[in-house]
Amino acid sequence: MRRVLLSTAIALWGSTILADDQALLLGVERYANLDRVNGAADLADAESGLKAVGFDVKTQINGAGADMSRRLTAFVGDLGGAERVIVGMSGAFVTDGGRTWLLPVDATDPILFGLVGAVSLESVMRTMAATPGQSLLVLGADRSANDRYGPYMRDGIGTLDIPNGLTVITATADGAAELLQDLAEPGADVMALVRANSRLSAQGFVPDSLVLVPEDVTPVVAPAVPEPTENERAAETALWEGAQALDTADAYRNYLRRYPNGIYVEQADALILEITTQPNRAERLAEDALDLSRDARRDIQRDLALLNFDPRGIDGIFGPGSRAAVTNWQQENGFSQTSYLTLEQINQLDAQAARRAAELEAEAERARAEKEQLDRAFWAETGAQGDEPGLRAYLARFPDGSFASQATEQLSVIEEGKRQAAAAEDKTAWDNATEANTEASYRTYLQVFPAGAFVAEAEARIAALNAPAPANDAAIAAEDALGLDGITLRLIEARLSQLGLEPGKVDGGLDEDSRRAIRNFQEDRDLSVTGYIDEQTIVRLLADGFQALGRN
């Protein structure tokens, strides 16, 4: 789109002076929440031509509701005594069937009683009716009234109740822009232009001929604009920097009023659009100013997860999952639901997470104490007796219990003793079965030696072979996906050791002792018991660790 503005006064010469002629150009192309209307902003290309033939032109491109309202107010205020009036409007229109509105750039899906900032075509036509026979309304809309917005509103231009003497031309957005440029030519006949273009249609007052710019008018060639002086550039830059410091739509509009052809016009337009259409912009900028590191963002995600607001990953990147979690947390805590955090909110979130971590650790400690009490009591009744049935009963109930290693060692001694005392044939059959180490080999042994020395061991090994795997492929994959490095693995083992879960040597190796400690940790905290690290396990481990270190 070309945006051509004349800032110098226009002095007309020729045989006719068009005094007090008024024109208004409203085009909205880049909607924040609706589809783009290609070519709607090209209405501005007609501005210089209309000015050159004496029209006082007011133009608003991609305006928010407040911008278009101010432009319309200024236009209506200057209409008194106007001999000719031209209005061009292009963009997204909606109708309830009897009334039609042009939507501003910040419009959302329209509803009948929610058209904030929209421009009523009926109101515009009533103001133009004061100049019958010399008033032209050009409407550019690319879509017909088909798509519905609820039961009462639909897209497009509805049936217009056009006042007497007003000519209304409807066209596509680019067709409207071309027509407005063509009719600024001296002697141009609006009706002839309509008849020559099938994309244009006329309603209302439709005479055989309508010429709004007499043929004997001489268009003014705008004088060359002198380059601004160094002081003028400095003044403009100072005003622009002041607008940036305030960072409000009004500040940028003030700059545009003072420098409509200035250096920073495009930036000002873009920022006004961003401010008027982007939700929670101020809150986003305030969070950006905190300059949160990736580690700080991970801490926030971990806090949210501890409080059951799932951020969909603890990676230090605030994507849709994290923003949704923040929004839900804000709602529960009485804050505005912006999805962006303030320092006060971060501190409150951190305090809540620390308190929750302490509560969870206390619950885990109670569960561990209860489990240890049951463990010791069961051992006293079974394995402490030192016989094979008791030891096996204990291991079946507490495979990772406090006395599991002791029970396993004692069973090994018992088995070795039985092996030494067994008959040679029985011993040989058992050695063959253990070498194969299959369910079939142990069942063959049981069939041949139903009263053999190794019957209990054979039955135990068959049960072990049929027992579910301690961890499935999904648990292994979940741990692998975390990409835990050696330092983190050693921290995990150190924390397990600090909790008295005996993970073995703290070397980052995660051997069977470590896996048993992880299973106990998970069981105590009512987590999925796999012996492998997943996201919830590491959140709890780190949270417990922060609590133990006195995090505040």
Image (cartoon, rainbow, N blue to C red):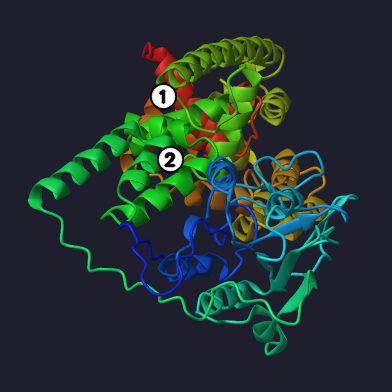
Q: Which residue is mark 1?
A: 495
Q: Is residue 241 above or below residue 34?
A: above
Q: Residue furthest front?
A: 15
Task: Write the residue at 44% across / 45% down.
Answer: 272
Q: Which mark is residue 464?
A: none
Callout 2 secondary element: loop
Toward the right, the furthest residue is: 151
Q: Residues within 10 Å of mark 1 (few under 14, many from 20)?
A: some
Relative to residue 522, is residue 429 depicted above or below?
below
Residue type at tag 2: Leu
Which corner quadrant of the image does residue 220 belong to?
bottom left
Q: Indicate whether 360 appears above or below 296.
A: above
Going 59% across and 43% down the picture, which residue do you hit? 65
**Cβ–Cβ under 8 Å for marks 1 and 2:** no
Residue 230 vs residue 278, the one in the foreground? 230
Is 80 placed left or right of 348 in the picture? right
Task: Identify the residue shown where x is 50% and y is 79%.
Answer: 186
Rendering coords of residue 289 (x, y %): 33, 32
- Residue ID for mark 2: 510
What quarter of the picture does the N terminus occupy?
bottom left
Compared to residue 532, the image places residue 125 above or below, namely: below
SS at mark 1?
A: helix
Q: How many marks?
A: 2
* Image position of 112 (left or right of 180): right
* Residue type, numbered disc 1: Arg
- Front residue of this view, candidates 235 and 432: 235
